[in-house]
Image (spheres, rainbow, N blue to C red):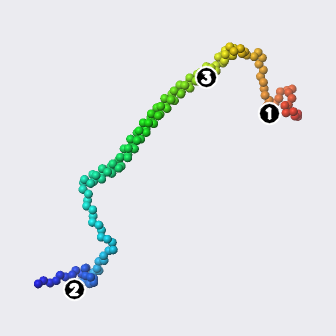
Amino acid sequence: MSLPAERHPAWSPTGAPAPGRRGAARPVPRRSSRAAPAPAAPRPGPRSHRVGFAIAATVLLGPMVFGIAGLNALLAQQSLRIEEIERRIASLDLEHRELVHEQARLSAPGRIAAWARRNGMRLPDDIRPLHSFGEDQAAPTGVADPGGGGP
């Protein structure tokens, strides 16, 4: 018959070395109150890497492409509006030039004098300038002070 198996000193319930063994007592390892760690997840295969990359690329690049396309559409609309405004400015500039030319033609002194003669108007024979007296101007000699007060 065989002998019974010896107990390992590290696993002795008392922490003392097993009988027949020499050496110091080793402490008994304590069990942690923490749960045992979960087994590691299996590594994804090469196919799952491709699917993850495709999803990430779609999430990142999709809005960027959509934004660029929307920006191009807005720029095209603005370009059309600017062209329309430039055409409107050109037509208004031409109209302004025509109106300035017409205003200059209608306000010419010779034309006004001809119109006045046709309507029976004539220039006066005796032209006398009129002057108004202000505080900064002195009254001409011989004219009484309009304020009524004297020196």
Badge 3 is on which residue?
Answer: 103
Q: Is residue 104 above or below residue 2?
A: above
Question: Callout 2: few (<14), some (14-19), or many (20+) C-alpha neighbours within 10 Å?
Answer: few
Q: Quick one: 143 or 124, which is closer to the camera?
A: 124
Q: In this view, does 15 lie to the left or right of 125?
A: left
Q: Nearer the viewer, mark 3 or mark 2?
A: 3
Look at the numbered disc 2 and give the secondary structure of its residue. loop
Badge 1 is on which residue?
Answer: 135
Question: Callout 3: few (<14), some (14-19), or many (20+) C-alpha neighbours within 10 Å?
Answer: few
Point out the image quarter for the C terminus. Answer: top right
| Amino acid marked by disc 1 | Glu
Mark number displayed over residue 19: 2
Q: Which image quarter: residue 71?
A: top left
Earlier in the chain: of badge 3 and badge 2, it is 2
Q: Is residue 150 left or right of residue 118?
A: right
| Amino acid marked by disc 2 | Pro
